[in-house]
Amino acid sequence: MAKVSSAKHYDLEERTLSFAKEVIAFVNILPKTMANLEISKQVIRSSGSVGANYIEANEALGKKDFAMRIKICRKEAKESIYWLRLIEARGEEAEKRKQSLISEATELMKIFGAILGKTLNPKS
């Protein structure tokens, strides 16, 4: 279980790290088809980029820089969904894991969208 910290952004850092680790574990159980091998590389990159860009956002030089990094986080989460949808998962358990990862990426995308909205329109 993730350590509870006083700053919420650290919880999201842990969540995005867990997401990337889960993606890596998932691709390691997939059938080693040519397509899955190529798609796996893409989904590993995009899922890892979500958290890496969030860490960058937390070190942003200003509001515009922060907003841009959050947009990238949202974009990478959306891209992860795309690649996950393309992956061929064989068997019920693998398909469940795939759907769970798609759900997590969707939630992350929504979270980053909400952060972006509050950043660009703080009074709404």
Image (cartoon, rainbow, N blue to C red):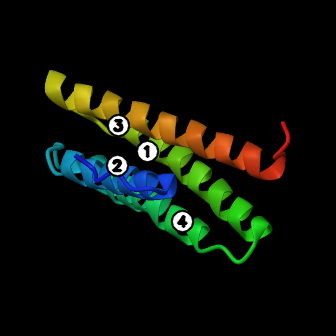
Name the residue rendered at 59%, 36% in the picture.
110
Distance, label 4 to label 3, CA atoms, is 19 Å
Q: Which residue position is annotated with label 1?
A: 83
Residue 80, image x, y percentages = 46, 47
Q: Which residue position is annotated with label 4?
A: 53
- Residue type marked 2: Phe
Q: Secondary structure at mark 4?
A: helix
- Residue type marked 4: Asn
Q: Nearer the viewer, residue 63 or 82?
A: 63
Q: Secondary structure at mark 2?
A: helix
Distance, label 2 to label 3, CA atoms, is 8 Å
Q: Which residue position is annotated with label 2?
A: 19
- Which of the two labelled residues, at mark 2 and mark 4, occupies the earlier sequence position? 2
Residue 72 vertical position relative to residue 121 in the rendered view, above or below: below
Residue 94, image x, y percentages = 19, 31
Give the mark toward the camera: 1 or 4. 4
